[in-house]
Every structure is written in structure tokens, then in C-alpha cells.
Amino acid sequence: MTGRMTRRRLLKGAFQGSAVAVGIPFLDCFLNANGTAMASGAPIPVRFGTWFWGLGHTPGRGIGEKTGAGYEFLDECRALDPYKSQINYFSTFNTPLDGRPNNVHYTGWVGCRTGSAPMKVGDIPAPTLDVLISDAIGSGTRFRSLEVAATGNPRDSHSARDSGSLNAAEVSPIALYARVFGPGFADPNKADFKPDPRIMARQSVLSAVQEDSQDFVKGLGRADRARMEEYFTSIRQLENQLALQLEKPAPNEACAVPVSPGDVPLGIEIQTVSSNHKTLAHLLAMAVACNQTKVFNMLYSASLSALRKEGEAATQHTLTHEEPVDPTAGYQLETAWFNHRSMEALAGFIEIFSGIREGDGTLLDNTLIFANSDTNFAKLHALDGVPVMTIGKAGGRIKTGLHIAGNGDPISRIGLTVQQIMGLPVDKWGARSLMTSKPISEILV
Amino acid sequence: MPTKRSHWLLTVLTFAAALSLTGCGPSEPKTSGGPIEVRRLSEAQYRNIVADIFGSDIVVAGRFDPFNRAGGLLAVSAGSATVTPTAFEQYDSLARSIAAQVVDEKNREFLIPCKPAAADQPDEACAGQFFAKTGPLLYRRPLTQVELKRSIAVSAAAAKSLGGFYPGLAYALAGMLETPSFLFITDRLKPGADRPALDPYSKASRISFFLWNSAPDEALLKAAEQGDLDSKSGLQRQVDRMLASPRLKDGVRAFFIDMLALDDFDTLSKDPVIYPAFGLAAANDAKESMLRTITDQLIDHHGDYRDLFRTHKTFLSGPLGVVYRAPVAAPDGWAPYEFPAGEPRAGILSQLGFAALHSHPGRSSATLRGRAVRELILCEKVPDPPGDVNFSLVQDTANPDYKTARQRLTAHRSSPSCAGCHALMDPIGLSMENFDGAGQYRQQENGVAIDTTGEIDGVKFQDAAGLGQAIHDNPATASCIVNRAYQYATGRTIAKDEKDWIAYLERSFAKDGYRFPELLRRIATSDAFYAVSPGEGRSSAPVKSALGPNGDGGKS
């Protein structure tokens, strides 16, 4: 459309030939680029999610050298072939440390998700990407974001506003089900809707809690007052949840309320993780489709992945360091086996999102998934070329099916681009050598 | 009813206190203290408070956001932890569940001090009585007038909309359980003091969370209200009372769960094919056995802390008996057990609570165990591994030269970049190789006899029992627990000007025969424990009590 303000046009205008930082307005034109809508006429929101797997790929076995369109997935990524047109793969982006230590299996994912290298394990130097995005788009749904891990450990979460506010992961399918689809969930496709009269009483209680909290922070110093901001955000989130429960949700043909998954064992044996990942992914996808959240985080395996085969003494992580290279194959066979399983799990995750019809397309078409690992070559804890992918069309706001080589550019360029695609008014992101104002224009629409 | 042992403990403590108060021995070095702390309640603290106030029948069913370990202790992380939206959702759910149970018909008679004039109507007087009694226990201080009125008003409004006094009371109580005044342990300053000092209620909280891992009881709050905690003798009385209480075990258990990272048992799993005897029950019991061994030695027997590393005594349950391959006197419960003299199974490092915890799911790890001894027991930081290490030799059991962990690790240490750190860890961990990844005793690995000789800081030994003796004799062992106990007590790392105080505390611990309750008493009755120096941006306003400073009905 002539004269239409596209994102690409705006970003190009803002960045080309100018060193001056320009704040980008948060415009509606960043949303619904396809102009698609639900059958009810309601616009389809664009969602953002992350997917994490530990320990990267074996060098030379993830992606071929060809860049741009028509790229080739190699052995460990073969399971992703059916979704290549929905995927952008980013290789050879670097994580410069500026003299900071490479805290093995930690610095890689923190640098990628926060645009800043941590000083030590446990440091979250800046909010993670999902937190920044949920701050911008997370309102209007019951949950600002949902964090899920298939490993059975709630600490396995890569979502945090700072070092003291890790968004702990939901690890039990039945607990996730109860949280999203239990009391408080209103089926949008049911004709009758009767708000619970107790909700208004709960709102009054929260108002009192809010007042009490205001009094409480008056007595605190500046640092602790700042820390309590997250607490106030949390109260507002619950207030928002309650307010939404008083409204009849719009009919939503994509939403099919799942059945309870039942109680299942948790653990790190790979069959257990694989099964739980699948169950959690189904619940998560339906939570998104049913408009319960617009932001989600799924962790398949931890960065120090302890996944293992039943009856085997070695874990995936110990294998990466201790397994000898097979002289015939030229790589670590068992390690590669686990890497295969990671990408199969990602393919399964994508399949679930692409299997949910929404408007004229699928849930995946209206979602942007940022998938990354913590290292390139786990055996060496390499930070040059930590693998990153974007998956999904983000409502038509991203070009897909491309292999982008970073050639040593800071990995934060990917995070900056993703924020801009999600409509955040940000023109630079990151710290020190990871600070960048250069989005990846090849994927911008 | 007090036991003979608690009478004896009280006598000893009182005598020791008298000595210190009469000026015997060197005086405590002065410190300027640390910053004001605002610490989020831990899961255990939350649960303990609910049980203390409302009874252990109240079910606290739900998930709590975990802390990340900082400075070696979860307690230190509590000072920077906040409440995320997910965590608040959980707190809301827990609070409503707890409050509903409190007002339930079967409990209200005991937990609510009055009956409403009409059950289907608000009753502000009765609600006021309830909150005036319960509120201070939840907030660890008197309620302000504003807080009291707010709770009564919320209760009345909810009672009207829900059509009942008790549902209204439950909603208002749930609200209290969601406030930062409940969820955060907050230091507050004494008004009008010449220099920054904690108010008495903040002191009471410090003592209580340190010694009992729970909120102050009514007696301690009363002592705070009366100003007793500002005098040495008044403080001493309260500390002695709390040290003599059975609840001391809750506090000591919480400390050792934190110090020894026993919370890691929550996510520990072992391969059921390789270790069929080590299931969930054994994992839970391994942690419990460790804690029973510790409290038995330190509290029940008032023993030397260092003897934990060479004791043959422990406690066994049925599932543990299978793993230890030992007879169990009470298969359905717990029974004391003593490993035969001469066995390498001596000291807590040789128990499942350590050996299984610091292993891989399917095999032992001399490196993980060595690192845990250095970091958890001796408070030494082992550097993280460098990025570019070839570990192939460690795993290559097919190589006839590398059948045992010792052979593999020795080869691995031939790499100069690995040698430095592994020399700190492996000679310790290799002495525990008699215990496999589940902590079960073995004499061979891959058909080769295991060599359990080891060495730490120049002291050589033959096996795990020898390691225990070496840890017992190592000066860092006592120094470490002193440092950890003080950090745990204050919820922060040690301040720069507290070096002399810590050295004094270490000397006192030795003088006290390495008795852990004496260390707790030294800290809890010290000036340093309560000293504060609010830094830039950290201050805290005093509390204005609903009862007024003299209990005068809130004229303040």
C-alpha cells in the first residue's frame, strides 16, 4: 500500500546514515502485518516465546555453509527440515567478553538473552529478552508469561529481570494444567459465562495489599524500593488476571481445552524428559492459543545438560567432555545422539504450534520463537557461533527460511532485531562490546 | 516438659553467659555492622511460621520460587530476592488456602479468639480481636493503627459481599499473608537513637530466624516490647530460652541444609538400572539421616562439631538399610545405628547424604566430592574449569590403563591447565571412591581394586575415615562454619571491618570446645549481630505501633 508505514521503512529511516539514537514509537503498525483475524473478527495477537537446549551442536553437523535462502540442515538438525521455511538460522555470531570470564555453560546463554556478559555464575546483568518483550506485550492476558522446563528442576529457567528475580519454571504437567486450565480459566467457546462473585472480593483484598505495600516501601532505602518494583508488577499482574476473569472471553476457534495430563514422573532420563517436554509443549501451545499468555519460555535441557540414557553412567554433559572422538566417524557418537534428540524435540515443539489452526494460518504463523543454546562446541565451551534460530512468521513481520552468518558480529544483533520485530521501541541493545544498534535487516519485512 | 539434657544445657549456657558478662576473657571487637536487610522468607520459614501460629494441621500445599545460591548460602540470596509474578500467584493461592483452613469450622474454635454476633454478618470487633492477636505474629511487630483498621475494613467488606463473617475474615487474612510486611523480613531502625540501631522487633526477628528459622513467638515479641532485648541480661535470657527449646533443632537443621546444600536432594535422581536400591525414598531418607546425625551430635550430645567428620553413628530407615546393606532396627521408622569400628564409613562425608549427593546419576565423582569438601566444608573457592579442556581420558574405561577413577583422573591431571584445580579436589575425592554414585560400599571398580589413599593440604590418609580425621584436624573446618553461621545469621556476606570480630568468634568457638550451640549463643548475644550501618540508599523507617510505644492503645 503506497505510503503505508512499514516496520522496515521506519527502521531503515531511523538507522541509515545517522549515529543519533532515535527512539522508535510503539505503533500499531508493528502488529498484525498480515491483517489476519479470528473468525470472530478479533485481531490475532503476535506472540513471543523462547526455546532452549543445552550443549549446542557438533561442529560441522548442524548447518551447511550455504547462507541465505535454500540453506541446508546437516545431520543433527535434519529433524527440522519440514519447518525450514519457518526457520532462520543464525551462525557465527560472537559473544565478546571484554575480559570477563567465560563462565562455562552460563556466559553463553546469558550473553545471548541479555546482551551482556555476566561477571560470575548467577549474575543476570540485564533483563532477559522475554522479560523485555512481556513488559511491552504481556498485558491483556491472564499470565504475563509462562515458564516451563522439561527437566524437573524449577531452577532451570532462563527468564529473569535481574539476579534476584528468576522466573522459576513450571516443571510438572499437571501443575501447569491446573495453573492455566484449572479454576480461573474461562472457556472462550462456552456459551454460558458467569463470573465468580468472589473475584470482586479478591480485588478488594489486593487493593488493600497494594496500600499496605505502598506504606511498606516508604520505609525502605532507594535500592530496596527499586527491588520492590517487581513485587508491585506482580500485584498488578494478579489484578489483571482477576479483571479478565470478570469478562466473557471472545470466542476463539483455535482454543481447544486440553484434558488433564495426570500425574507423571519427573526426571532427567531422556525418555522421561522427551515425554514431559511433549506434554508440556501441548499445554503451553494451547495456553497461547487460548489467549492465556502472549509470552512463553520452554527449556528442553539445561545448559549443563544432565540428560542421560537409562542404565548409562554418563550424562550428556559429561559425554561432551569425556567421550572420545570416534576414529571412523570423526566425531563423538554418543554426544551427537543427544544433539539429535534435542533437535527432534524442537521439531516436535514446532509441529505442535504449526498444528493449531488460527485465522487463515497456524499458531506458528502468529508466533516468534527464539531458540538458542549456550555454546557452539560444548567440548570446548566455545562462544563463537552459539547457535540461535528464530521460528515462526510473527504475524508476517519477519522474513524466514534464511541462514544468516554473523561473521563475528555481536550475537546481541539477533536479540535487538527480535525486539524490534515484536514492536519494542528500541534502537540499541546490549552492553560493552555486545552493545549494538545494528538490527539484522535481512529478516525485517 | 524439659528433659534432663535441656536442664543440663541451660545450666552450662547460663554459666558460660555469666562468665562472659562478668568480663572474663577478651572483649568482643567493635564492628560498624552491615546494611539494613530486607530478606524474602524462605519456603521453610514460611511453613514454620504458619505451623507456629495456626498449627501443624494447616496444610501448606504449593510451590515456592527457589533462591539461587549466592556467597555459598541461600540465606544470603534472600537479601536480593524479589517476588516475581509467578511467585506472587503462588503466594496468593497459598494464602487463600491457608486462610480458608484457619476459619474452617474444625479450626475456628481454637484459632479465632471470639465469635461473631451473627455468622452471616461482619463483626468488626471480633475481626479486630483476631487481627490484633494474629497480625503481630505474622508481621513480627505490632500492627500500626492503619494496618489494623485496613484489615478490619477488608474483612467487613468481604463479609458483606460473600455473606458471612468467616469468609470475610479469611479474605482479609489471605491479604495479610500476601503483604511484603509478612513476606519480607525487614530490618527497621530504632527511632531517636544516637546512631543507627535496630529496633527491638527487628532484633527479635534476627534472633528467631537465626535460632528457630521462624518468626518470634509471643514471649520474644513481649521481650521486645518491654525493651528487654536492649539489655545484655534481657537478651541473654531470651537467647538461653530459645537455645534450650526443642525448636532449636529446626533452626540448626535449616542452617545445615543451607550450608551443606542439602536442598539439592529436591532434584537428585539416580539411575534406577545402575542403582536399583536408591529410589526416591532412599534419597529423602539420606537427607533426613544426615540431619538427624548432625542434630544428635551437636544438640542432643552437645558434641564437638569437628567430630561429625569421624563419627560412626548415624540413623537408618528401611530404605537406607538396603543401600547401606546394614540391619535396620526399625524398618518402618528411624533407629540409631553405629557403623562397626575399623570401617571406612566414618563421618558424615561417608554417608549417603554427602557421597550420593555429590556424584553423577550413574557413577561416583571424585572431583565433585573433592570440590564439595573444599567449598562447602572448608569454605574455599575452587576455580571453574577453563573453557578448552579435553576430558576424554577421564571417561575412557575401555582403555586397559584407565580402569579406575584414580587412573583416569591422574591422566587427566597431566594437562597443565587442569592440574592446579584437580590437585585441590581429586586427592580428597579419591579417598571416597569406596562409595559408588549412590553411596554404596564397594572395593573394586571395573574389576580393579580401588586405591583410597588421599591427601589434603599435605596431610596424607588411607581412606574416607582418614579423610574424616584430616577434616576434623584442619583449622579451616572450624573457621568455615563460623563464617557460614555468621553470614547465615545476618543474611549477608561479611563486612570489611568484621575481620577482627570473625577472628574473635573463631577463637571463642575453639575455647568453647567447638560446641555449635555455644557459637550460636556467641553470635546471638553479640553487639556485632545487631550492628547496622545503613549505606547509601538503604534506610528503614521505625514502626508506629497500633498499641503505641507503651501499649497505650495506639496514640502514637
Image (cartoon, grey):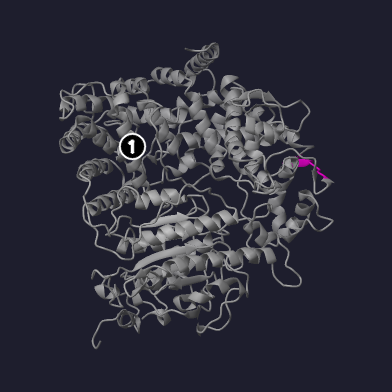
* As drawn, B405 above or below A126: above
Q: Position of residue B36 (x, y in %)?
A: 37, 39
* As drawn, A340 above or below A193: below
Foreground: B551 or B431? Answer: B431
Foreground: B302 or B202? Answer: B302
* As drawn, A255 above or below A60: above
Spot the residue most to the front: A191
Residue in the picture at 47% in, 51% down: A171
| Stretch in magenta | B449-459
The answer to whether residue B140 is seen in the rendering is no
Residue in the picture at 24% in, 26% down: B130
Q: In the rendered view of the protein, which quadrant contains the C terminus of chain B?
A: top left
Which residue is identified by label 1? B97
Spot the residue most to the bottom: A2
| Among the 4 quarters of the image, the one containing residue B294 | top right
Q: Residues within 10 Å of mark 1 (few under 14, many from 20)?
A: some
Does residue B454 show up magenta in the picture? yes
Foreground: A126 or A279? Answer: A279
Relative placement, left or right, of B182 versus B257 is left
Does residue A431 show up magenta in the picture? no
Q: Position of residue B309 (x, y in %)?
A: 67, 31
| Among the 4 quarters of the image, the one containing residue B318 | top right
Label 1 is placed on what type of residue? Ser
Which chain hosts label 1?
B
Q: Position of residue B157 (x, y in %)?
A: 16, 37
Relative placement, left or right, of B401 versus A405 is right
Q: Position of residue A297 (x, y in %)?
A: 43, 60
